[in-house]
Image (spheres, rainbow, N blue to C red):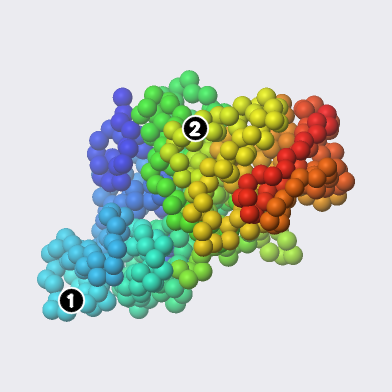
Amino acid sequence: MKKLPIAVSSFEVMRSADYYYVDKTKLLGQLNDQGRYFFLSRPRRFGKSLLLDTLHQLFAGKREFFHGLHIEPLWDWSVSFPVVRIDFGSGTLKSPGELNTRILELLKENYQRYQIELPSQTDVPGLFTQLIHKLHEQTGLPVVVLIDEYDKPILDNIENEPVAQAMREELKNLYSVLKTQDAHLRFVFMTGVSKFSKVSLFSGLNQLQDISLSPKYATICGYTQHDLQTVFAEPLKGVDWDKLKQWYNGYNFLGDSVYNPYDILLFLSEDQSYRNYWFETGSPSFLLKLFKQQQYFLPNLEAPEVGEEILNSFDVERINPLTLLYQSGYLTIQHTLERRGHLRFVLGVPNEEVKVSLAEHLIGGYLPRSAEEMYPLQNKLYDALIAGDVAQLERQIHSVFAGIPWRNYTNNELAASEGFYASVLYAFFASLNATIRAEDISNHGQTDLTIELGEFIYVMEIKRDTSQDYVAGEVNPALEQIQQRGYSEKYLSSGKTVFEVGIVFNTHQRNLVQFNSVCVS
């Protein structure tokens, strides 16, 4: 039986041993025919390093690794181009000095691989320039430059803006060399997670072509449904395809949707066990801090509509949480539309794995408890919703906010922000895999949250009261708004039991002070 290529990023290893391999070489041939300078953004664990190594062996003319693949009869194997490899994927660099040392080491490795004597100068631009010139002179062929995870030194320090800026400047020192070497370059391909606009990469005569949202390269990384049903047909025999799609498919880069390869390989290695494989490889701790700092309204994560500029790039000094969520793989494109001649994208969480896990991490940002402590609270909230027990629902919402430590409110305006309470509830409901409609629109306006779980629908309006001593009156203003504006009317023919739920929080008590509900169907 073939082996699963878990953590295998070497194309030579993949093809020299009996590993499962999905042939992407048709797309690499298209790249070569189309141009010379390319950039690809994909989330982590998506196979970018393997793709880059495949390009390395292809331009190096290693035909023995391409037998039987699409590109073998189409490539000129008589030519072996010199290839410079720079990879920032391993380790974490925490200062410009560490980064400069790493860059020098990587450049020297390339000198040694081609047995070129190191020049006397030791500055980064000089070494990189001389490497390209000497390789071109030595071989008589222009140079291929492949850079993997070009942005990782910045992203690893994104929480510390001054350090991130300094790392960006250090990388600019390296990448700016490429803008002046057009006569010596045959092909340049760079990968990363984010597209930073101030690293001397995306402007100039030899401007990198960003293929991250090019439909014809949408599947250049990741596994398609066809890949799974052909290449992995044997190990996936008997799988519930609908459940597999629900859990791990859904990443969309304006073409066929793809699975994260890391998920599928671990799913197979664990005897088709459904778990959060990819998400466990990293926690979005910075995102949690960013959400709280910006008082981000978490329900806006439900189907936000954005322009292409939001997805493409951001700067260290001005970070949009949606950009980071998209580029990191927590959001993906659900569908596209056109407004006033501009292309717009509606985003969404790609699949079950990311949805539930992201929600649990978001909860942890507001309610720092261990998973063991959180689990009973989530269970009780789930049991209340699935049973239509609104009295229990009230008790559990009160418990949720009672568990938020007082220090979370110190020196900030979280409790005073309009979206704080809805954001916490959204995170909890999302972690239960409930269907959520944020700012649910009707013909009379929009309600804050509509939650659907099992045979019950809860139409919720949330109000924030700022008085020192709140006394609940006979009328619940949140419930009154639902009823006056008919927010629940569109669900009355759903065949499910519908509750109208009015919720009032007080900023001084920092908790629920009024909860009223009415069953309307």
- Label 2 Cα neighbours within 10 Å, binned few <14 / some 14-19 / many ≥20: few
Q: Residue at point 39% right, 47% down? A: 282
Q: Residue at point 29% right, 70% down? A: 96
Residue 58 location in percent, x, y?
31, 53
Total tally of numbered discs in the picture? 2
Q: Mark 1 — residue? A: 122
In the current view of this chain or complex, which residue is farthest to the top? 238
Say which quadrant the C terminus sits in: top right
**Front in this rendered view, residue 176 or 440:** 440
Above or below: residue 156 compared with residue 124: above
Q: Residue at point 66% right, 60% down? A: 343
Say which quadrant the N terminus sits in: top left
Residue type at numbered disc 1: Thr
Q: Is any atom of residue 25 visible in this view?
A: no
Return the disc, 2 or 1, that comes first in the chain's sequence.
Answer: 1
Residue 500, numbered circle: none
- Per the model, the C-alpha gap separating discs 2 and 1 is 55 Å
Q: Mark 2 — residue? A: 375
Q: Is any atom of residue 171 visible in this view?
A: yes
Residue type at numbered disc 2: Tyr
